[in-house]
Image (spheres, rainbow, N blue to C red):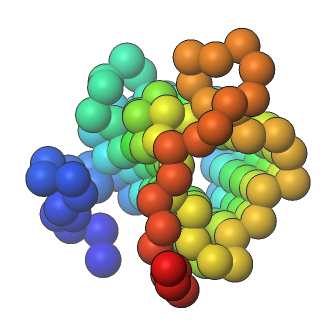
Amino acid sequence: MFGNEKKTGAQRTIDTLIGAKSRLTGDLHFEGGLRIDGQVEGIVQASGEKAAMLVISEQACVTGAICAAHVIINGTVNGPVHATELLELQPKAKILGDVSYKALEMHTGAVVEGRLHHAGSGEMSKPDLKVVAGATN
């Protein structure tokens, strides 16, 4: 559930959990791995660690900006999302805000109501995409 996770050959861990019945109001700065199952109102930002990972679970809701290297979303985000490395949008992800990413993995069912910006470009460019389901050639 929130133990070790293997992704692209690197082992990542969740160091901190905000439980499903928790509600946090205010800015949240973290290092390592953070999983949010509850509600957060405020900025959620990784503190300078390139390997920082943020997981927004299916039942979670974040109202505010998000910034981390590796962001996995399967819940609701009301605000902009900035993933400096990889953004994974799982089937129940819903983002109401602009999204900035270096690499993007988007599953069928995920919704983004905002602009997609590829990191490092002044305007929208062709994104790095990975087909994850239902692809036929």
Q: Residue at x 29, y 68 (%)?
A: 2
Q: Nearer the viewer, residue 20 or 105?
A: 105
Is residue 105 positioned above or below 63 on the image?
Answer: below
Along the horizontal axis of the image, is 2 left or right of 47? left
Q: Nearer the viewer, residue 70 or 65?
A: 70
Q: In the image, residue 33 lies at what x, y percent?
A: 32, 46
Along the horizontal axis of the image, is 61 left or right of 67? right
Residue 116 falls in which quadrant of the image? top right
Q: In the image, residue 13 lies at what x, y percent?
A: 21, 54
Mark yes or no: residue 18 visible. no
Residue farthest toward the front in the current orientation of the protein: 137
Is residue 79 positioned above or below 112 on the image?
Answer: above
Q: Residue at x 56, y 17 (%)?
A: 120
Is residue 21 positioned above or below 79 on the image?
Answer: below
Q: Residue at x 86, y 45 (%)?
A: 114
Q: Residue at x 23, y 57 (%)?
A: 7
Q: In the image, residue 63 lies at what x, y percent?
A: 77, 47
Is residue 36 positioned above or below 85 on the image?
Answer: below
Give the total of numbered labels.
0
Mark yes or no: residue 125 visible. yes
Along the horizontal axis of the image, is 70 left or right of 128? left
Q: State the quadrant of the N terminus.
A: bottom left
Along the horizontal axis of the image, is 6 left or right of 52? left
Q: In the image, residue 90 lies at what x, y percent?
A: 55, 70
